[in-house]
Amino acid sequence: MDMSTLFTPEASKPTGTRRRAFLKTPLVGLTLCIGLPGFGLAADEPQKYGGDGMPNGLRDSPKIFVSIAVDGTVSIVVSRSEMGQGVRTSMPRIVADELDADLKRVRVVQAPGDEAKYGNQDTDGSRSTRHWFMPMRRCGAAARQMLEQAAADKWKVPVAEVVTQNHQLVHKPTGKKLGFGAVAVAASKLDVPQMASLKLKDPSKFLYIGKVDTTLTDGPGIVTGKSQYGIDTRLPGMFYAVVARPPVLGGKVKSFDAAEAMKVPGVVKAFLIEGAPPPSEFMPVGGVCVVAKDTWAAIQGRKALKIEWDDGANASYDSEAFRRVLQEAVSKPGGKVVRNEGDAYAALATAAKRFAADYYVPHYAHATMECPAATARIVNGACEVWAPSQSPQAARDRVAKSLNLPAEKVTVNVTLLGGGFGRKSKADFVVEAAQASKAMNGAPVKLTWTREDDLHNDYFHAVSAQRLEAGIDANGKIVAWVHRAAEPTIASIFAADQKNLAAFELGLGLTGMPYQIPNVRIENPEAVAHTRIGWLRAVNNIQHAFAAQSFIAEVANSVGKDHRDYLLELLGPDRLIDPSKIEPWNHGESPERYPINTGRLRRVIETVSREAGWGRKLPSGQGLGLAAHYSFVSYMAAVVEVAVTPKGELVIPRVDIAVDCGPQINPDRIRSQLEGACVMGLSQAVVSEITFKNGRAEQDNFHQYEIVRMNMTPRKIVVHFIPSESYDAPLGGVGEPAVPVIAPALMNAIFGATGKRIRRLPLKDQLSSPV
Amino acid sequence: MTTLQINGKPTTVDATPDTPLLWVLRDHVGLTGTKFGCGMALCGACTVHLDGVAVRSCQTPISAATGKKITTIEGVGGSKVGKAVQTAWLSIGVPQCGYCQAGQIMTATALLEKTPKPSDAEIDGAMSGNLCRCGTYTRIRSAIKVAAGMKEQA
């Protein structure tokens, strides 16, 4: 490629310390801030929301994201990580659309971790498109206006007479044309237009935004095996490493003997990696690293290690015993009151009828198909890593800290991610690779986790027990709602003695309960974390929606009402709920711009139930189940259709999902995210579970940690979009919010089919065993 | 030293005979399209063809692959069926993260070579050894039908 590129990227600036997004403003005054330095805002700093409120904020300059070669090739930088959500397809299309660029002449360039330059790069929270749609539009529009100005200067005509069309500049009065490349150099010397002077496209002129197109930036590489994931990095002279990690959180290597390991052909070195004691946040847990000439030799060498572990304080963690502890905690009034309206206990006491139920959701592992893996080398005091990272700046900072280097001496190149789901926001595996390279005097080392490593040392989804109690009046209406949830908190990886849910966890489907009930009390009894707890796609919404959406169906049944009708009645009249009153975190979004809109929730329920044929007569052993949930500022509802054979085998002919996520930027990728969320939700509902005994995760591989296979997949997953009135409407998240509706909809369907109520996930053989 | 026939090319590698083909392909030959997912033949990410038969390369020592034609994702597009499968995968927009798709494509190609017009049950039966954590299964089914020239309902 001709290197006379345009819009020359600015030189990288040194990066300061950073915090995870959730440690910023929305948590001020809440538990998590205790003991975390640099937390919160100065008193006089105005509250920022959305992408502006994220660490290092947003950027919209084409000088950062766009370069145009003299041959006209447009390069667009993607600062977010591709993990299957389609961000490397969707983001460049937003820029290209405003730029009137021909996609066939657009190249996508992946940004390294550098938030001082690119703004926030955390690819999580269902917010890449939500936060970056407008900045990317502005970026494309600014680039287009700079090209138009350069062409006008060249033709010596008023800029108003110049327009863009399919990768060309056109002088309207004469029809003269120039390619983008012909004015790229001149355009690059112009100032970026001020925001106020940007002319964004009329959405009716969009070429790519909102259009159904299955083309993927990485599609051709993926189907031919050429795409590069983190595990695929190869450098000259590279070594291969695996690590034997403490099987128990907080455990340490007491002693190790590598004599037999060193005899394995190909093994070159075995050494200790120091771990950070809990709370170890994103740093490695330590262990013994084996380096070899290929991965297989490293794995064989690790098998030959003799290690004596000091298991530490969590050596007795037993998840079955812990289930009883959590269930006991939620069985009686108490715990931190996290929402309180009216007098729920008094209303319960005087209600005509009461209904209570307990729900349990286990630990889950992310089990990304690509296990964590990273490659590092250290040359002349600078470390370069290649990693499938959802949070490359966080990785950069942790590697720098671990090697005692300034962050500008660390480069984090972002590869494709073979799945992320929250696991690869954590830099522990990247730091391990850097440590291994350091131990090899800077030689390149690829460090790979095996599946066993992945399942044993994940940042697990929190186990939870919940009790719901309803007071019901003589007309069958719920007048009191008590919800108690005990679950170890993600805050426990950041600070000691964290036993209550953080604001961002309460805000994931617990305190934002939108139903119109006069007396509400939500309590959060304490729970101790005995393993690393992390974000897993949809996070706490999984258990909160499972409990609440199962419970409402149970109450409807107990008063003899149709579940859909009852749910809509409970929702009450369409209204905007101010989230700051009940759920101040609000996903970091402005409460004015993102109120909880019960009308939108109603509409997805109505849409999905209509499309799925709610109310139709089904043969015995078949059922429809409904669930709806608001999360990541999007509205979702699902109807699952099931058939249960007399032997208790489950068949799922069809799942319908209705989504209101505001404007739809890449409809096919939204559809694919919802299809995938459905399958992941079914895994959680039906087969997946991590259990602990003696402090150790008991599942080693996919024969024990099962995930849904094609033979369990619904024959049809049908996605129904609620159209958005305008591209100015606030965008909702897409990657996560469809997950939580699946388990409750499934269990409600199973109840309809069999009369059996499943309150404990996963289902496993509960249908074939006696009730 | 062992000589393997990989994608039509004789390739000499220096690895012990018990080394799984997966790691020889990835670490020694540099064909990283074949993926590691479990190491126990549970997920199918490492699927390659040995004389046209889909096998899990993580459980295939190179001693068992010697003298056989090894086809990987990098070479499968050389066959008419393999190419049709790749094309269908793109037109349906199957991949999400894409990591498992090499294995899916190798299994699907082997299925269609043997069963050009598979039934729904045959597709599910052949493909259920291949895990996809992103959950692209419904699109994989559609893409197999498109590759087979069967009409797929919208």
Image (tube, coloured by chain):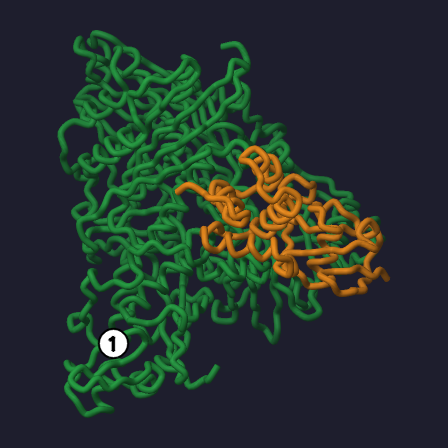
| Residue A194, picture quadrant | bottom left
Q: Residues within 10 Å of mark 1 (few under 14, many from 20)?
A: many
Q: Is residue A298 visible?
A: yes
Which chain has been coloured orange in this picture?
A: B
Q: Is residue A250 visible?
A: no
Q: Residue at x 53, y 38 (%)?
A: A365
Residue B122, position as x, y percentages in the image: 59, 35
* For residue A94, side relative to residue A324 (left or right): left
Residue A305 vertical position relative to residue B32 in the rendered view, above or below: above
Residue A411 vertical position relative to residue B62 in the rendered view, above or below: below
* For residue A147, side relative to residue A725 (left or right): right
The residue that disc 1 covers is A164
Q: Nearer the viewer, residue A766 or A406?
A: A766
At label 1, which amino acid type do we have?
Answer: Thr
Q: Residue at x 52, y 48 (%)?
A: B149
Residue B60, position as x, y percentages in the image: 76, 47
Secondary structure of residue under mark 1: strand
Residue A338, position as x, y percentages in the image: 28, 31
